[in-house]
């Protein structure tokens, strides 16, 4: 029984820690781009790019993003913001 509570407490701790940062992906068209913030909006969500953001399928960097492009964005949510970890063009 004692081990059961230890496992339960550790599991609860992991869930709480992981809920503050998660990774996911989203597809859609780029609605707007903010050059000065290094951000763009897809499906109403503002994504920020960082130096570690990867670009695929013909995209070489943030400057290659254009409004209206259909993209898939892999992202992490942390500190109340969405950070793009990978951006690739979709057909």
Image: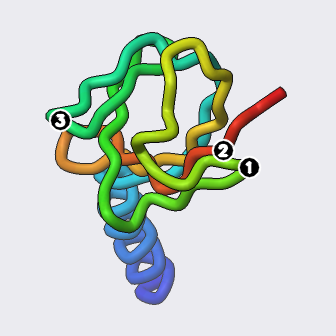
Q: Secondary structure at mark 1?
A: loop
Mark 2 closeness class: few <14, some 14–19, many ≥20 residues within 10 Å: some
Say which of 43 and 53 sits in front.
53
Q: Position of residue 53 (x, y in %)?
A: 44, 59
Tell me, for residue 13, which label it has, or none. Answer: none
The numbered mark, 3 or 1, whose residue comes first in the sequence reads 3
Q: Is residue 23 left or right of residue 34?
A: right
Checking the image for residue 88, the label placed there is 2
Q: Position of residue 18 (x, y in %)?
A: 39, 60
Which element is circle 3 on?
loop
Q: Is residue 27 above or below residue 62?
A: above
Name the residue tied to disc 1. 57
Q: Are marks 3 and 1 in contact (CB under 8 Å)?
A: no
Q: Nearer the viewer, residue 80 or 26?
A: 26
Mark 2 or 3, nearer chain start: 3
Q: Where is residue 14? Give x, y as percent.
A: 39, 68
Asked if the residues shown at circle 1 and circle 2 are in contact, with their CB atoms under 8 angstroms apart, the answer is yes
- Per the image, the residue denoted by label 3 is 37
Residue plotted at (60% across, 40% down): 25
Classify 74 as above or below 9. above
């Amino acid at each position: 029984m004692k081990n059961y509570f230890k496992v339960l407490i550790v599991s609860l701790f992991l869930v709480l820690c992981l809920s503050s940062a998660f990774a996911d992906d989203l597809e859609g068209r780029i609605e707007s781009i903010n050059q000065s913030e290094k951000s763009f909006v897809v499906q109403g969500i503002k994504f920020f790019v960082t130096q570690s953001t990867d670009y695929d399928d013909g995209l070489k960097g943030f400057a290659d993003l254009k409004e209206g492009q259909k993209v898939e964005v892999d992202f992490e949510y942390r500190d109340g913001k969405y950070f793009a970890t990978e951006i690739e063009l979709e057909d």
